[in-house]
């Protein structure tokens, strides 16, 4: 699976949009971009994933650049409960084995009141 | 409620004792996973299972064992051979065995070995 690079930490004001960047310059054509978040001492929570097109769900939007070398997770109206570590993961379609996800250290997003 | 349950939330054991962590899912998912997380670190894969009665080693399987006798259950045993067992253990599942599906996580068990 391709390696990802994320900033260690970010701040965002409550009510504003939080934009979390992720670089994955070695991504290959069959790899999806996944985002999870982990609130302290809880299990990771799935947020969104995409391959080429931008995606949106009830939690967030995912913007993937045309060359697929980077992406941005957008939380449109951040709340204090969005304070968490956010993980960007690039996932190979293994096609024959259900292997695990590779989690790096992620971005610690702190929402300021 | 549908989901993944792990019990207990906190577990304390003496050094040299084996301990088994529970993971149950009622999502009818085929694949299940165990991860370990150390403070300030990402997750590392211990074992995974694509189907009942089959499982594969992950990146850090030494000192751990698993079983998959039922589709809904994937217990993890931390043996005395694991050199540094104190960690946060997370179980996950995904709907099928192809490896393309989203993984969903349980709440975790924090194991402390004294």
Image (cartoon, coloured by chain):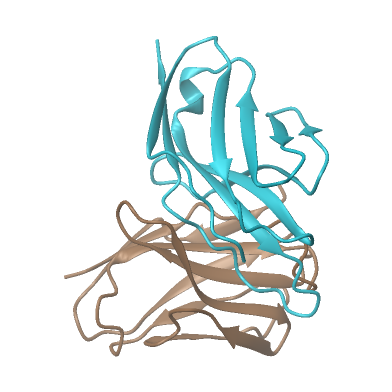
Chain colours: A cyan, B brown
**Which residue is at a point 59% across and 55% down the rendered structure image?**
B105
**Which residue is at a point 45% across and 28% down the rendered structure image?**
A83
Specify the quadrant of the image occupied by residue A74. top right
Judged left or right of residue A11, residue B83 is left
Query: As displayed, is residue A80 above or below residue A44?
Result: above
Query: How far across and how far down the image is residue A9, in percent?
Result: 38, 34
| Residue at the left extreme of this rendering | B114
Judged left or right of residue A93, residue A74 is left
Query: As displayed, is residue B25 above or below residue A15?
Result: below
Query: How far across and how far down the image is residue A46, in percent?
Result: 64, 45
Specify the quadrant of the image occupied by residue A50. top right
Number of marks in the image? 0
Work out whether residue A21 or residue B98 is closer to the camera in this orientation and state it: A21
- Residue B72 seen in the figure: no
Query: How far across and how far down the image is residue B8, in percent?
Result: 42, 60
Specify the quadrant of the image occupied by residue A96. bottom right
Judged left or right of residue B20, residue A78 is right
Quadrant of the drawing holding the C terminus of chain A: top left
Query: How far across and how far down the image is residue A51, in percent?
Result: 79, 49
Query: As displayed, is residue A20 above or below residue A17?
Result: below
């Amino acid at each position: 699976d391709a390696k990802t690079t994320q900033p260690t930490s970010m701040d965002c004001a409550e009510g504003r949009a939080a934009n979390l960047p992720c670089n994955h310059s070695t991504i290959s054509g069959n790899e999806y971009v996944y985002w999870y978040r982990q609130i302290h001492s809880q299990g990771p929570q799935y947020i969104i994933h995409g391959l080429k097109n931008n995606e949106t769900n009830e939690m967030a939007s995912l913007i993937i650049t045309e060359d697929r070398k980077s992406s941005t997770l957008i939380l449109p109206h951040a709340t204090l409960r969005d304070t968490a570590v956010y993980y960007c993961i690039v996932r190979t379609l293994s096609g024959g084995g259900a292997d695990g996800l590779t989690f790096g250290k992620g971005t610690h997003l702190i929402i300021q009141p | 409620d549908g989901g993944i349950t792990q019990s207990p939330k906190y577990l304390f054991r003496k050094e040299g004792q084996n301990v088994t962590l529970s993971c149950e899912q009622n999502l009818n998912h085929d694949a299940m996973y165990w991860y370990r997380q150390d403070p300030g670190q990402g997750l590392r894969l211990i074992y995974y299972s694509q189907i009942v009665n089959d499982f594969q080693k992950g990146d850090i399987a030494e000192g751990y064992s698993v079983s998959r006798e039922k589709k809904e259950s994937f217990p993890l045993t931390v043996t005395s051979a694991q050199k540094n067992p104190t960690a946060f253990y997370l179980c996950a599942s995904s709907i099928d065995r192809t490896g393309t599906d989203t993984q969903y996580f349980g709440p975790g068990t924090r194991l402390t070995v004294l």
